[in-house]
Image: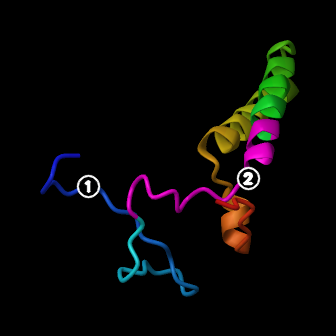
């Protein structure tokens, strides 16, 4: 982003469920990463294996396995876990 441009900001929510406008999360700040590096690698690898197994099945269970695997791959790639965020857990020690 060039100097003087404004980007899209994200805002955390308070316990009441409203956006906390006093504490914006800046893009690229790493504030959304709450999964550690080893856990990210395990999620990515496990998700890829689960999705591959699901692709080999030609039924509704296979579709569910592909969806679960894709969610794990996304979790590993992004480093963000929504469940951890909701529970206030942070395994990222950086």
* Labelled pair 1, 2 in contact (Cβ < 8 Å): no
Residue 65 visible within the image: no
| Depicted 73 relative to depicted 90: above or below | above
Task: List the single residue furthest toward the bottom.
Answer: 16
Q: Nearer the viewer, residue 49 or 68?
A: 49
Q: Nearer the viewer, residue 19 or 24?
A: 24
x and y percentages locating residue 25 in the rendered image: 42, 66
Could you say which quadrant of the image residue 11 lies in?
Answer: bottom left
Taking the spot 78% from the left edge, 39% from the top edge, the residue there is 43
Mark 1 crowd level (few <14, some 14–19, many ≥20, 10 Å Cα) = few
Q: Give the quadrant of residue 66.
A: top right
The range drawn in magenta is 26-42
Which residue is pictured at 70% across the width and 61% down the height? 93
Dot 2: what SS?
loop
Q: How many marks?
A: 2
The answer to whether residue 58 is seen in the rendering is yes
Q: Residue at x 36, y 83 (%)?
A: 22
Q: Which residue is mark 2?
A: 36
* Residue 22 horizontal side relative to residue 88, left or right: left
**Which residue in the structure is indicated by mark 1?**
7
Measuring from the top left, give residue 7's x and y in whole percent: 26, 55
Side (left or right) of 13 relative to 39:
left
The crowding category of the residue bearing disc 2, from other C-alpha atoms within 10 Å (few below 14, some 14 to 19, many at least 20), is some
Disc on the earlier residue, 1 or 2 = 1
Q: Position of residue 34 (x, y in %)?
A: 66, 59
Relative height, residue 93 to residue 20 (above, below): above
Query: Residue shown at 43%/52% (left/top)?
Result: 28
- Pinpoint residue 3: horizontal percent, then vertical percent: 15, 53
Residue 3: in magenta span: no
Which one is in front, 46 or 4? 4
């Amino acid at each position: 982003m060039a100097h003087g441009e404004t980007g899209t900001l994200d805002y955390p929510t308070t316990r009441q469920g409203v956006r906390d406008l006093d504490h914006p999360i800046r893009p690229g700040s790493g504030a959304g990463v709450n999964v550690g590096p080893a856990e990210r690698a395990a999620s990515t690898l496990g998700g890829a294996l689960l999705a591959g197994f699901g692709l080999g099945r030609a039924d509704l269970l296979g579709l569910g396995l592909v969806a679960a695997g894709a969610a794990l791959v996304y979790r590993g790639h992004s480093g963000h876990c929504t469940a951890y965020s909701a529970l206030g857990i942070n395994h990222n020690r950086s």
